């Protein structure tokens, strides 16, 4: 068993949320402290709403909510955990694997043949040691895809051959 995902994914995701909340609080604090937010609510609240809208757009665009917290390669299957939900994904259930890059961060996307309790695809960040090496990340994705192809072929072959 080997963890193939970034081990601090949960902390990274929480850090993004905390950064967003801290920025909104820093923008809102001066007007709350001097009371302008109550005397001129429209003028003070509109910039805060624009900032919140930016963060919502950014977090949706980055698909931060769909990143798996942990992916463990157990040899014949993957064990995936996201937001307290765990799933065991057999390699025969994997349709493909690819590398995508969003905001200069590489991500491996594993597309599944059938929908599971965590969805029909698994997105995860590779181990930190691979972040600067796109070739190694692509090799990991190709390895997952090849093992899925072999597992799919062996599960579809007749029992007598």
Image (cartoon, grey):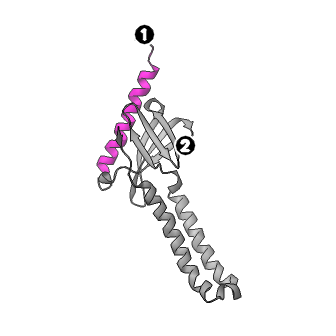
Q: Is residue 117 visible?
A: yes
**Spot occupied by residue 2 in the image (x, y as percentages of width and height):** 34, 41
Q: Is residue 10 magenta?
A: no
**Residue named by callout 1:** 160
Q: Over which residues does the magenta segment extend?
A: 134-158
Q: Is residue 52 left or right of residue 126?
A: right
Q: Secondary structure at mark 1?
A: loop
Q: Is residue 145 magenta?
A: yes
Residue 52's place in the image compared with 59, above or below, is below
Identify the image quadrant of the C terminus.
Answer: top left
Q: Is residue 63 visible?
A: no
Q: Is residue 15 left or right of residue 40?
A: left
- Label 1 CA crowd tier, 10 Å (few <14, some 14–19, many 20+): few
Kindly identify which numbered label has been placed on residue 118: 2
Of 5 and 133, the residue lying toward us: 5
Identify the image quadrant of the N terminus.
Answer: top left
Residue depicted at x 56% and y 64%: 57
Residue depicted at x 38% and y 27%: 150
Dominant secondary structure, magenta: helix
Q: Is residue 89 left or right of residue 5?
A: right
Residue 123's place in the image compared with 43, above or below, is above
Q: Is residue 51 left or right of residue 131?
A: right
Kindly identify which numbered label has been placed on residue 95: none
**Spot occupied by residue 125 in the image (x, y as percentages of width and height):** 40, 51
Residue 67's place in the image compared with 17, above or below, is above
Question: Which one is in front in this view, the residue at disc 1 or the one at disc 2?
Answer: 2
Distance from label 1 to label 2 (Cα)?
A: 35 Å
**Spot occupied by residue 85 in the image (x, y as percentages of width and height):** 53, 44
Q: Secondary structure at mark 2?
A: loop
């Amino acid at each position: 068993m080997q963890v193939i995902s970034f081990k601090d994914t949960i902390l990274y995701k929480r850090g993004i949320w905390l950064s967003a909340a801290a920025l909104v609080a820093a923008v809102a604090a001066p007007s709350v402290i001097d009371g302008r937010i109550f005397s001129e609510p429209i003028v003070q609240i509109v910039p805060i709403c624009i900032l919140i809208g930016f963060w919502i757009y950014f977090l949706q665009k980055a698909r931060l909510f769909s990143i798996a917290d942990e992916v463990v390669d157990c040899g014949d299957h993957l064990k995936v955990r996201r937001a307290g939900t765990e799933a065991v994904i057999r390699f025969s259930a994997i349709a493909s694997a690819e590398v995508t890059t969003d905001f200069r961060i590489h991500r491996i996307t594993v597309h599944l043949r059938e929908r599971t309790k965590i969805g029909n695809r698994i997105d995860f960040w590779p181990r930190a040691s691979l972040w600067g090496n796109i070739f190694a990340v692509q090799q990991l994705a190709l390895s997952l895809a090849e093992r899925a192809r072999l597992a799919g072929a062996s599960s579809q072959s007749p029992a007598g051959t």
